[in-house]
């Protein structure tokens, strides 16, 4: 439950010409807040609470000097609720401000100034206040009664103390809790940005002007989106959608929609938003907070849903009366926002957002130090009902400060592509590695340089060998085709048997098989044909023992070998010298054939 005090917006402060005149006369824009003290629960229900002074029993303002001397070095709390629902003025950074202890009783104690004023931190502002206006108490005496934050059901709830003699009774729902805060833990914070689990550590940071240094979320300040959303930006909701959301929210808060002056106002809020550039959803949140869901006396009797011009002396009587709710909305968005708090030239302008006591509309508009947070809570509630259309922006905006950090990962994404290019570059060199094995294959051919051994086969005579491939081994099959049975001339050769030189019969060793134990020599075939280096074909048949050898030789002249045959005559019977030449040539022929075959094999390797 969040304690809110009913609005009533205009005060004498609005008539001042400059901020210098505000110090003595600054008052709440809705003085009705001083007449009625209300509270709001997590569902947004607003109700009146009994207001009383909240002085802590251990001392009074006049006893502070002695108390401070005795408790030096201990954690302390500043109690602003010493006068009931009344305004307390203070100074900060050369300016002037005001607050109401009935809406926020406690503040962090930061010490004393040389001129005897109390330094404090409250709702984001660090200021000084006269010691007679407040009470300083030991933290241990009120530790269970100070304000704090906690996560409940995934939502960040602000429990606000209005009386340090009692437990907090006012709760503000700030929407989805940041991930670094856990349920079941108390977190302390007087600026709403940095959270501490240890009250003393928080005070130390505040006192040393190192706010957030030792916080749970150090370096990652939390900002309630709707509380710090620019009111110059339009909502994404239409007027009809706002009406539906408003009806649902009122039902959840237990408000009679038929009697509320806010029912059906969505169209008017969007209409004037588009004219004066003032956010309709946030303006509706302010109206809910100021008029108690459109049920306050001023709202019901004067169509004044903002309590405008309700001066302090007689808020109900002096408050402006409007012909309609629509006219009141127009006046608020035009004269109070567009031409007033949101106008950079207006002395009341401290930022174009709801804010707190350090910046924003809340600085001058309301004495409630948590007025901006409460209006933002209503806006969040409506947006949640509507499907988080504006809250999606909220999730992006808070990330914008962190986006520099998400850009860093994006920048790596860009270099990450170069990284994928890097692997591609290695792929290119990897191909040279594939070529490398091919290069070794080339050197493997140099192994065939065994060919140089050819010179040993009488390279000069080898030239005749190339002619041998032309021996037309393929033509040999043609030989049978040539019915040149004219070879009857060869019968003259049969005189060879008379030559007992069995060496000649042993020439075709390739086809000879010696039968073990008998001494017989047989050809692997009954008849064999050999081609001489000169291109002559020799056929012979051998039968019998080694002692009796019969050789039949048939000489066929191949036309293509004529030049050679003219040079190398066929061996004749009894011509031993020519037979030796024939044997040598035959050996050369065989050697050359082996070399050629070796070459071919190496080429096809």
Image: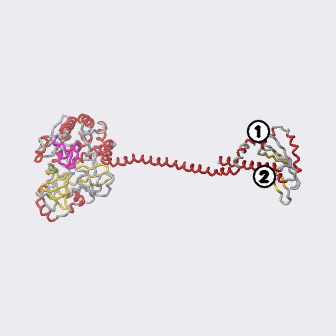
| Disc ID at residue 510 | 2
Residue 363 picture location, percent across and down: 18, 47
Q: What are the residue bounds of the magenta stretch? A: 346-370
* Residue drawn at point x = 14 percent, y = 64 percent: 69
For the residues carrying marks 2 and 1, which lies nearer the camera in this image?
A: 1
Q: How many neighbours does mark 1 have within 10 angstroms: few (below 14), some (14-19), or many (20 or more)?
A: few
The colour scheme used here is secondary structure
Residue 420 picture location, percent across and down: 44, 47
Q: Secondary structure at mark 2?
A: helix
Q: What type of secondary structure mainly makes up the magenta span?
A: loop
- Residue under label 1: 560
User: What is the total number of numbered labels drawn onto the structure image?
Assistant: 2
Cα gap from disc 2 to disc 1, whole angstroms: 26 Å
Q: Which image quadrant for residue 18?
A: top left
Which sits in the foreground, 461 or 390?
461
* Residue drawn at point x = 39 percent, y = 45 percent: 414
Depicted 321 relative to depicted 87: above or below:
above
- First-in-chain label (2 vs 1): 2
Q: Which image quadrant for residue 556?
A: top right
Q: Is residue 509 left or right of residue 439?
A: right
Q: Is residue 358 magenta?
A: yes
Which sits in the foreground, 332 or 513?
513
Residue 558 picture location, percent across and down: 79, 40
Q: Which image quadrant for residue 239?
A: top left
Which sits in the foreground, 74 or 574?
574
Q: How many neighbours does mark 2 have within 10 angstroms: few (below 14), some (14-19), or many (20 or more)?
A: few
Q: Secondary structure at mark 1?
A: helix
Q: Is residue 202 left or right of residue 412?
A: left
Q: Is residue 114 magenta?
A: no
Which sits in the foreground, 358 or 24?
358
* Residue 391 shows in this picture: yes
């Amino acid at each position: 439950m969040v304690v809110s005090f009913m609005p009533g917006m205009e005060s004498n402060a609005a008539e001042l010409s400059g901020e210098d005149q505000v110090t003595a006369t600054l008052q709440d824009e809705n003085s009705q807040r001083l007449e009625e003290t209300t509270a709001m629960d997590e569902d947004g229900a607003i109700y009146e609470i009994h207001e009383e002074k909240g002085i802590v029993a251990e001392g009074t303002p006049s006893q502070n000097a002695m108390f401070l001397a005795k408790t030096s070095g201990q954690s302390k709390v500043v109690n602003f609720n010493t006068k009931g629902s009344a305004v307390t003025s203070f100074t900060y950074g050369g300016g002037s401000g005001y607050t109401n202890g009935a809406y926020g009783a406690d503040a962090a104690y930061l010490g004393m100034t040389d001129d005897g004023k109390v330094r404090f931190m409250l709702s984001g502002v660090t200021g000084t206040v006269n010691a007679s206006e407040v009470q300083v108490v030991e933290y241990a005496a009120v530790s269970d009664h100070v304000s704090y934050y906690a996560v409940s059901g995934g939502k960040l709830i602000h429990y606000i103390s209005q009386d340090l003699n009692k437990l907090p009774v006012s709760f503000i729902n700030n929407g989805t809790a940041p991930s670094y805060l856990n349920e079941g833990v108390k977190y302390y914070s007087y600026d709403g940005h940095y959270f501490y689990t240890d009250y003393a550590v928080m005070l130390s940071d505040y006192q040393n002007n190192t706010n957030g240094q030792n916080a749970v979320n150090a370096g990652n300040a939390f900002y309630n989106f709707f509380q710090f959303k620019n009111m110059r930006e339009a909502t994404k909701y239409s007027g009809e959608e706002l009406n539906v959301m408003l009806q649902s929210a009122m039902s959840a808060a237990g408000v009679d929609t038929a009697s509320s002056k806010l029912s059906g106002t969505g169209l008017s809020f969007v209409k004037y938003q588009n004219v004066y550039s003032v956010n309709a959803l946030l303006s509706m949140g302010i109206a809910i907070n100021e008029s108690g869901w459109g049920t306050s006396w001023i709202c019901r009797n004067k169509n004044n849903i903002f309590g405008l011009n309700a001066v302090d002396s007689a808020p109900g009587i002096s408050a402006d009366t409007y012909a309609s709710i629509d006219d009141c909305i127009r006046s608020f968005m035009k004269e109070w926002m567009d031409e007033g708090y949101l106008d950079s030239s207006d002395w009341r302008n401290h930022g174009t957002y709801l804010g707190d006591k350090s910046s924003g509309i809340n600085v001058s508009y309301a004495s409630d130090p948590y007025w901006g947070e409460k209006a933002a809570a209503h806006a969040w509630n409506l947006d949640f009902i509507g499907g988080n259309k504006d809250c999606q922006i909220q999730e992006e905006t808070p990330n914008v400060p962190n986006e520099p950090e998400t850009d860093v990962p994006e920048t790596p994404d860009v270099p990450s592509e170069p990284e994928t290019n890097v692997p591609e570059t290695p792929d290119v060199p990897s191909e040279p590695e594939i070529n490398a094995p091919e290069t070794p294959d080339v050197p493997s051919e140099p192994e065939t340089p065994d060919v140089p051994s050819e010179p040993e086969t009488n390279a000069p005579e080898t030239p005749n060998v190339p002619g041998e491939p032309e021996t037309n081994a393929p033509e040999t099959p043609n030989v049978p085709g040539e019915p040149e049975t004219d070879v009857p001339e060869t019968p003259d050769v049969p005189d060879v048997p008379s030559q007992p030189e069995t060496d000649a019969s042993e020439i075709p060793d390739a086809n000879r098989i010696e039968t073990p134990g008998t001494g017989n020599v047989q050809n692997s075939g009954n008849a064999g044909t050999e081609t001489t280096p000169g291109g002559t074909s020799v056929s012979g048949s051998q039968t019998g023992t080694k002692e009796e050898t019969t050789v039949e030789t048939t000489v066929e002249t191949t036309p293509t070998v004529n030049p050679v045959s003219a040079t190398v005559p066929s061996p004749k019977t009894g011509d031993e010298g020519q037979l030796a030449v024939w044997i040598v040539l035959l050996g050369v022929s065989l050697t050359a054939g082996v070399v050629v075959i070796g070459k071919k094999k190496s080429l096809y390797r």
